[in-house]
Amino acid sequence: MTLSIGLDFGTTNTVATMINAVGQAEAVHFTHNDENFDAFRSVLAFWESHDDDVRRTHAEAGPWAIDQFVELAGECRFMQSFKTFAASPIFTDTLIYGRRVNFEDLLATFVRRVQSHAGIAFPKRVVVGRPVKFAGGAPDEALARTRYEAALRAVGFEEIHHVYEPVAAAYFFAQRLKSDAIILVADFGGGTSDFSVVRFAVGRAGLDYTPLAHAGVGVAGDSFDYRIIDQVVARAFGKGSEYTSWGKVLPVPNGYFTKFSRWNELSIMRHSRDYRDLQQLVRTSLDPERLRAFLAFLDADAGYAMNRAVSAAKLQLSQAEEGRLSFHVAGVDIERTIKRVEFEKWIAPELAEIGACVDRALSEASLAETDIDRVFLTGGSSFVPAVRALFETRFGAAKIETGEQLVSIAYGLALIAREPDIGRWAV
C-alpha cells in the first residue's frame, strides 16, 4: 500500500489523517500552548520584520497565526475562511506587503505550516476532500480543482485524488454497517453544507458503493454566527439607527455592518474610508453613543474577541435553552441572554435553504424520505438542535446518527486512500 494522507481542508478547520500501524485512521496531532488538538484552524497571518534594513515577510497558520494577529494588534495581514476564494474567478490574487499572492500560494503556504507544526514528513499521495458546491455566487468547480492541484504539487504531493467531503464521511460511517443500506450524509462545514445519497452493499469483498446524488449550498456555521452578530452585536453598534443630512432623517447604511461576517476585515476597516465616514456620522447621528461604541470596538481591534464570544454563545445554545453573549472590550459592554427560540427564528432562512438542498438531493436520486435507511449528520453545525430537528422531522429520529463530527471526513479520506481503486470514490 502506498503511504497516503487524507486532507480535509475546511473553511474553519483542517484535519489531516493517515493510516496507523494497526490499519486504523488516525488524525495528525498538534500541540499549542500545552493544548493538544487535531482540528487545525484554517487561518493565515502574514507580517513583516526589519533586520539590518532588510524587510522579510513571515507567514503562520492556525493558532500560531492567531497569536501573531493578537500580539501585533492587527498590524499584520490576517486571512480566515480563504477556502471561499477557491472557486471564485473574481479572486485572482491579493497584495501582501507589495507581493501579489494568489489562492494557490495561500493554500501551499498553509499546508506547509500544517506540516511543519505536525513535525512529520507528508507522503507523496494525498486524498483531498472538496465540497459538493464551493462557496460563492457562481463558483467555478474546474478552477477550484486546478488551484488545489497547483498548491498541493507545490508542497510536494505527486498523486492527488479529489473526493466529495460527504462521500468521505459516508465511507467512514459505512464501516459500522452490517447490512446493505441507502445513506443520506449531511456535512455541515463553516462555509458550505453538502449532501450525498449513497447506496452501500456489504459483501465478502468489502463495501460496494453506488453514488445516487450529490447537492450543496453555501450556508453553514459561519452563517449562523453572523445571525447572532447581526441581531445583537451590530445593533449595539448602531445598526438600525438614524442620522440627519440636509434636513432629512436617514438610516445608517447597513454596509458598515456587513463586514462583521469576516471578523478579520474589521482590522482593515480601522484604516479605511468607512472608519472616517463613521466618525462623520457620529456628529449627525440621532444615537451617537452606539456609533462611538463601534469606533471604540474598531480601535481596540476586538474582532477576534467578538468571534470567540459569539462562538461560545452558539455552543451554549446547542446545549441549553438559552445562551449568554458576554463581550467586554475597550468600554464596549454587551451582556445579552439569547433564547434558543430567538436563535432558531434568526437562522430560519438558512434552515429553509438547507431543507431545499436536501429536496434536490432526494429528487436527483429519485427517492423519498422513506427510502433512506440511515442519516449521518457530521460537521460542527450538526450540533445545532434546530439542524438535527430538521432531519428528525423528515426522516424520523431513529434513523439519525452522528459521531466524530469534526474528523469523520478526514478519517474517511484516509480510509479511502487505502482502497485498491481510489478512482471509484474520486471525482
Image (cartoon, rainbow, N blue to C red):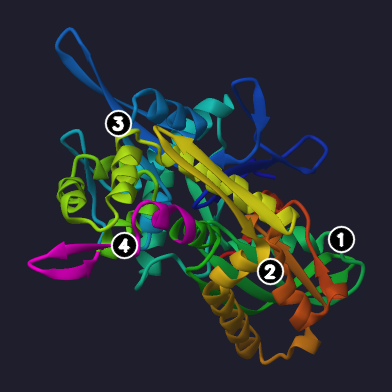
Residue 309 x %, y %: 54, 43
Among numbered discs 4 and 1, the one appearing first in the sequence: 1
Among numbered discs 4 and 2, the one appearing first in the sequence: 4
Query: Does the residue at mark 2 contact the one at mark 3 (Cβ under 8 Å)?
Result: no
State the extent of the magenta-drawn residues as a range.
231-251
* Nearest-to-viewer mark from 4 and 3: 4
Q: Residue at x 47, y 40 (%)?
A: 333
Which amino acid type corresponds to the residue marked 3 in the rendered image? Cys
Residue at mark 2: 386
Query: Which residue in the rendered view is the most extreme toward the top?
Result: 52
**52 left or right, relative to 399:** left
Residue at mark 4: 241
Among numbered discs 4 and 3, the one appearing first in the sequence: 3
Label 4, label 1: how far apart the Cα atoms are: 55 Å
Residue at mark 3: 76
Label 1, label 2: how far apart the Cα atoms are: 26 Å
Which amino acid type corresponds to the residue marked 4 in the rendered image? Ser
Which dot marks residue 176?
Answer: 1
